[in-house]
Image: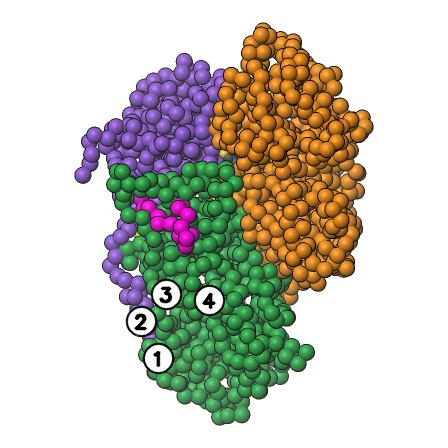
Chain colours: A purple, B yellow, C green, D orange
Amino acid sequence: MIDMTLTPAHYKSDVKPVWCPGCGDFGVLNALAKALAKLALRPEDVAVVSGIGCSSRIPAYTSAYGFHGVHGRALAVGTGLKVARPDLTVVVTGGDGDGYSIGGNHFLHACRRNVDLTYIVMDNRVYGMTKGQPSPTTEADWTSKLMPQGTGLGEIKPMAIALAAGANFIARGFTGDPNGLADLIVSAVEHPGFSFVEVLSPCVTFRPEQREWKKMVRGHALAPAADSVEAATRIFADDGMNLGVLYAGTRRPFAPPIGRAQRTPTDLERRFAL
Amino acid sequence: MIDMTLTPAHYKSDVKPVWCPGCGDFGVLNALAKALAKLALRPEDVAVVSGIGCSSRIPAYTSAYGFHGVHGRALAVGTGLKVARPDLTVVVTGGDGDGYSIGGNHFLHACRRNVDLTYIVMDNRVYGMTKGQPSPTTEADWTSKLMPQGTGLGEIKPMAIALAAGANFIARGFTGDPNGLADLIVSAVEHPGFSFVEVLSPCVTFRPEQREWKKMVRGHALAPAADSVEAATRIFADDGMNLGVLYAGTRRPFAPPIGRAQRTPTDLERRFAL
Amino acid sequence: MTNPSNSAATSVAIALAGSGGAGIMTAGNMLLEAAASAGYYALMTRSSGPQIRGGEAAAMLRIATHPVECMPAGFDLLAAVDWENVHRFGAEIPLGAGGLVLGDEAEGAPPAVFTASGAAIAALPLAAIARGIPGGRPNMVLLGLVGALLGLPEDAMHEAVSRTLGKRPAALEPSLAALAAGRSAAGSLQPFTPLAPPPGSAAGRWLITGNEAAGLGALQGGVRFVAAYPITPATEMLEWLSPSLESVGGVLVQAEDELASINMAIGASYGGVPSLTATSGPGLALMLESLGLAVASETPIVVVDIMRVGPSTGIPTKSEQGDLDIALHGLHGDAPHLVLAPNGVGDALATTQWAVTLAESLQCPAIVLSDQFLGQARAVIDRPAAGASPAARDVAAAAAEGDAPYRRYALTDSGISPMAIPGTAGVTYTADGLEHGERGTPSSQFTDHAAQLDKRLRKLADHDYGERWADLEGEGDLAVITFGSCTGPLREALALAYERGLAVRLVSLRLLAPAQPARLAAALAGVRKALVLEQNHSGQLLRHLKSSFDLPVPLASLRKPGGQQFNAAEILRHVVEWSAA
Amino acid sequence: MTNPSNSAATSVAIALAGSGGAGIMTAGNMLLEAAASAGYYALMTRSSGPQIRGGEAAAMLRIATHPVECMPAGFDLLAAVDWENVHRFGAEIPLGAGGLVLGDEAEGAPPAVFTASGAAIAALPLAAIARGIPGGRPNMVLLGLVGALLGLPEDAMHEAVSRTLGKRPAALEPSLAALAAGRSAAGSLQPFTPLAPPPGSAAGRWLITGNEAAGLGALQGGVRFVAAYPITPATEMLEWLSPSLESVGGVLVQAEDELASINMAIGASYGGVPSLTATSGPGLALMLESLGLAVASETPIVVVDIMRVGPSTGIPTKSEQGDLDIALHGLHGDAPHLVLAPNGVGDALATTQWAVTLAESLQCPAIVLSDQFLGQARAVIDRPAAGASPAARDVAAAAAEGDAPYRRYALTDSGISPMAIPGTAGVTYTADGLEHGERGTPSSQFTDHAAQLDKRLRKLADHDYGERWADLEGEGDLAVITFGSCTGPLREALALAYERGLAVRLVSLRLLAPAQPARLAAALAGVRKALVLEQNHSGQLLRHLKSSFDLPVPLASLRKPGGQQFNAAEILRHVVEWSAA
Ligand SMILES: Cc1ncc(C[n+]2csc(CCOP(=O)(O)OP(=O)(O)O)c2C)c(N)n1
Ligand SMILES: Cc1ncc(C[n+]2csc(CCOP(=O)(O)OP(=O)(O)O)c2C)c(N)n1
Ligand code: SF4
Ligand code: SF4
Ligand SMILES: [Mg+2]
Ligand SMILES: [Mg+2]
């Protein structure tokens, strides 16, 4: 029985966010609530899982089940949850540090494993929570206390990595466009298999210049490529500001059967009996 | 002073490999020794670093300095060593499990960081050391005790991931062609920045069918692409059997200055003196 | 033979050995199965050289009229198809003074390391006999010979070979012929004390490894989700679990690493499905941060650690009890959790099952410390007793609008708070590894921190663990305290001591954390001094007893590092010395 | 004021507070610097609300005529620019009975949590005064006021503000005007006991945080390579180290995670460059597997753990001494290593430097347990004494053809074997985490394992650690044993006890592992009973003392979890009770 009167407000909790005023993550929370309302999912059938970071605080701000784990392991928690409980809608959330730095390996393998869950990364190209260090998506010349001369390293391209690792749905949204972002999240949740949504979500405190993103993004600039080769060609030439769906593939989700017992453990004892 | 009389034999130690007879890793050891001889490097100026696995046993079989670390962390050890000792030639080695499964995050970040070292992965699409479980490059339908129905997962494309993560030199070799492989290793070592050499190296014990690789590989099928977009187009369409150099980029290696002191620690005390 | 004066032995230890590809392990398994079906108890362990595959191999068996849980100090028989590199097993296969070393005539004298003890030497043309049988192989000739020497019934031998090779008729025929040829050849050897008659029929007994038993215990405890990453010597447990889980409606996921394994298991358990992962020392080390998360978020989870020699990569194929420290104290912050250890191959079932039950009811992680010896040993055992009652997680019921808000981390008297399972309406919450108040909302208040620490300690401290916390055997004013795989040889040693008139109590701790000081003190009532037996270098159990038990008796230590199991004679010698000191 | 009977105080505790963006931390730092340059000793700690940035903030200062290492039980003055959410600091800023709560008239009454103690209340039109100065801000008015109340010299205040704002003249002028306005407004308040005259000039003293001191100690010890991943509260140490390392010819690499950090540091150290990483509990947990590698491969390495509240993510911004267990016992297998703890802000320098020296000479990992309090506290201290002599790794010389093969893991008497540095001819070898023989070749022999375990234990056990292992103070037949940041308040408590005629010895352990039982027993000679003081829930130091020291005196425990530091009065009360018990 699905209650069609659920509004976005139903998906928010009464816990006050610790985010700075103006933080991009507020918009992501709004978009997520809108998307869940559009999907008409009951809050108790949704689980929002995260790691550690400002962005990773999001689960407690929703009225869904939440799991706020340790830094970098959200996708592993979400994978275990979804495989064990295929009936739930699992949304994994987090930041660029959580997902691409310490959590990079799980990102690679979640793309490959293709479990039916949605991964939303709030990319602000900085470690907000620990007060402003560069992340893997930070520009080479951005200076900070820890890296006074900048990292000198090229930024990674998460969408290209997702594609190379086998992700089934790849999109980019912007927190300043909560409706567009909500639509992307809806598509991501509805798409079978692992869906990756990169969200440009400014950190107004440590990267105030990201307020300019709202002038830089190009809405609906990406439309699903025909195949991964075409998607690759596009994304390797991408400047990071094109919004929309890059790729929507048809790989079969990984969903090993669970709950279908043919035997009891006691039956298995026979294998050892002399 | 470089001793030009160094032959490949100089680069091997007297430790007897534990590898199974016919293991592809013997050919990689030979190719590495040949390459070091061609490069005319003194064994003591080379460090071979690895993780854990059959392939990761290689350091002790060379006469160079070796570091046989823990599973999955070879690239991190190699990175620290090269940054601290830029004068050394650092070759990091290992298997597909070590490098792409547990070590996947360091692989991503080594590609991005672009430290001037060479990473040789002996890919046999299996965990040899632990007696035959699937790795991230194992075909979806390959059955084993642990995965009696196969993994059901698509293989990752390490070269595509390397490209997306920013690797500066990407090539594929075959252990059955030690001369060609030695040439690739020479180019990789000579190329500034992070060089990735994927080597098809059969596990004759757990994947005897890989003996067929010698009939399947296509020598010199890859030639360096003009740019990463072209390389991406090629590698996303690649079947894994084309040998040669896919990409040779010009990104500046990460080599923070070390050893150039402007001050002594005692000078720094002044900052705190009242 | 432990019983050389009698005409028949109650226990015999045999090693089969040979170079790679000679089929030693196959022969060993057949011998074990033949002994089992003939009605004997038996135990088999294996060893092989450094080569990844195909190096020299040895199958070590003990066959007895009573349950056996360790190898003896000396082997009665070493039978090898060739001597190539077999000398490397010198330390692992000590020959008893009355022992026999049997080889192929064509191979020359056996390595001195085996014969130095004064063992008798015999040689037969094994390869030549095999060559006389088209498709025949020396390992089968040897098997027939050994079966005959031991007095194992011909049909039991026949059956063991047939069961293994039944699906390969081309191999079966010549193997049976070689077996028979070996049996006949036995007549030419000097008489060998045969086994006493079996103590009964095989019916009701099991043939199982510790790793399989642990896997079965997990399933009996209710585990239906396993995520793991292969590692020696835990892989066999996973390989058994994978298809078995599927058949009981569960699933095993091969994770990308141990960080993923433990977090996947936590995710599944958060979803309401009892979950487990298995690993060895290096993998356990990688799981510690997330084990702390399971403690703080109060998520049940079981980690089975099949200990191997450490530190670091150590010796992956050898046993050690060196992970007690990390299991007890490896989590950062104050993180109470459960640590259990099976003390025998069969006990791996009940202990793993109990670990699942405890983790589920106490909503916290449990670490099960098995080891390479227990895990890979294959043994004939009596059918294990039924385990603990199945998992019973205290689950929160759905709530309706207007009900008081759900307090996931309510400060209950027992310390246990009902846990909502996703899908349940009205009780959604966010599980958190940040310190929190009762509702789960993050808090940096000292009072909340102290209250939650108290709660998490209380639920473990106040639980009644019943009688399973330890095995207590024997009487007297001396006691030996141990855990895990040292229990088998200790039991045998104390039986021998008793025969000699020295009564010593055995205390084998199954529940290592939370410590049960009052119970242990009671078990030691009347004891004058105690010896702590363990297999590691630094005395980890000894330190645990000192730090957390405040025992009223002086403690001495008997320990050695891994790589060489204790045997009963060795322990007996030390116990006798210590008792007199 | 600790000295209300006199006309001047020797120690005053002040808290500045206000909502986010009000410039509280700036004002606090200026007050600290003014007190420092006026010739006082001082200590400042900070606290802020749950908001990531811009939430309410408090700067807690203690200014005194003698070195101070902890906050007192009660504050003398709470001065706030507004009361928005400031009540959340109620538990952290207890007001003494003779205290004063000072706020803005326009803000109404201060929160009851502060005034319940009976503190006096005063209000002034802070914001209104500030509004009267173009560009003036209430925090500067407050600062001027507080400076005047304390009797800090006007030029010291002036100078502190000028130094901070010197580069921003537009801000400097109005700030100085506001400061002056605040100073004048002080006259309207009831008299406040001013500080006694300073004990001397600032010359020779330092103003430093524990994290900076640890960083400087690392450099003094010879560290030239750091790899690390940001984590509260270790980040500031890394942020100080990054440019500092560069200036001394070293480098800091920001790693992708802690697994990479520790392995990069191991790689650099293998290359001959003394290396370090810094982290907090969750990061330390991730490093354990590779710390075991450093033990087995005998690679020197230092890990600084700035402890925060655990378990799991816990409370990242609060202090706790909860990582002693994991630091001592968190490695799998038997893995002897060093654990040290600084016991004061300044001591973080010498202790970190000593850790580097020991790690380098003993070729093993050293864990330094600092904590959030020590790390983030900023203090005026006497110039720290010179540290240990610089790192001295025993390095293998080049060998020529014909020399005996290099034995990296030679079984020397001391347990230390000369280590070849890549680039050195004739002594190439492979470092290994697999168990190995003397040359480093992997071995699964029991004898090699036992020999290398003995060697690795011996080199630590036999080293002479000299006098630095602990700080020993006082006399008497009672002792309190502690470590780390509990030492400051304990020292003060025992001084007060002594004034009252109760003599109690202080033992602050700096070297926690390897344990020094003989030295501690000697230090406790004549002691009747000892109290163990630590800040964690389960008594980790107590357990360590019980398990590894076999002390001849009965031990009692005084402990509480993190999130609230001990103060001297609290400890004194317990010590008095315990001494009488
Ligand atoms: C194991 C571990 N290492 C480091 C940290 C410290 N830490 C907390 S959040 C964070 C980075 C957050 O960055 P991001 O994921 O981009 O989130 P943001 O705050 O920018 O939203 C780090 C390094 C931690 N909590 N745990
Ligand atoms: C932390 C940890 N987890 C697991 C293992 C067990 N292990 C050893 S090697 C290996 C996989 C080896 O596969 P690969 O890297 O492909 O090397 P190969 O043996 O195939 O050459 C595994 C899982 C380990 N040593 N350490
Ligand atoms: S620090 Fe940045 S990311 Fe964090 S809450 Fe503030 S604005 Fe958002
Ligand atoms: S198991 Fe496979 S990879 Fe390992 S040594 Fe043998 S053939 Fe090579
Ligand atoms: Mg971020
Ligand atoms: Mg492999």
Q: Would you call the spot at circle 3 few (<14 residues within 10 Å), some (14-19), or many (20 or more)?
A: some
Return the residue at label 2.
C166
A182 in relation to C525, above or below = above
Q: Is residue B189 left or right of residue C253?
A: right
Q: Which mark is residue C319?
A: none
Q: CA distance from mark 3 to mark 1?
A: 26 Å
Q: Is residue B204 visible?
A: no
Magenta stretch mostly in which secondary structure?
Answer: loop
Return the residue at label 4.
C469
Q: Earlier in the sequence, mark 4 or mark 2?
A: 2
Q: Secondary structure at mark 4?
A: helix
Q: Position of residue D492 (x, y in %)?
A: 71, 42
CB contact under 8 Å: marks 1 and 4 = no
Foreground mark, 1 or 2, reads 1
Task: Identify the chain of the residue marked 2, using the numbered disc in the image.
Answer: C
Q: Earlier in the sequence, mark 3 or mark 2?
A: 2
Task: Identify the chain of the residue marked 1, using the numbered disc in the image.
Answer: C
Q: Is residue B182 left or right of residue C350?
A: right
Q: Earlier in the sequence, mark 3 or mark 1?
A: 1
CB contact under 8 Å: marks 3 and 2 = no
Q: Earlier in the sequence, mark 3 or mark 4?
A: 3
Q: Is residue C10 left or right of residue B115?
A: left
Q: Amino acid at mark 3?
A: Ala
Foreground mark, 4 or 2, reads 4
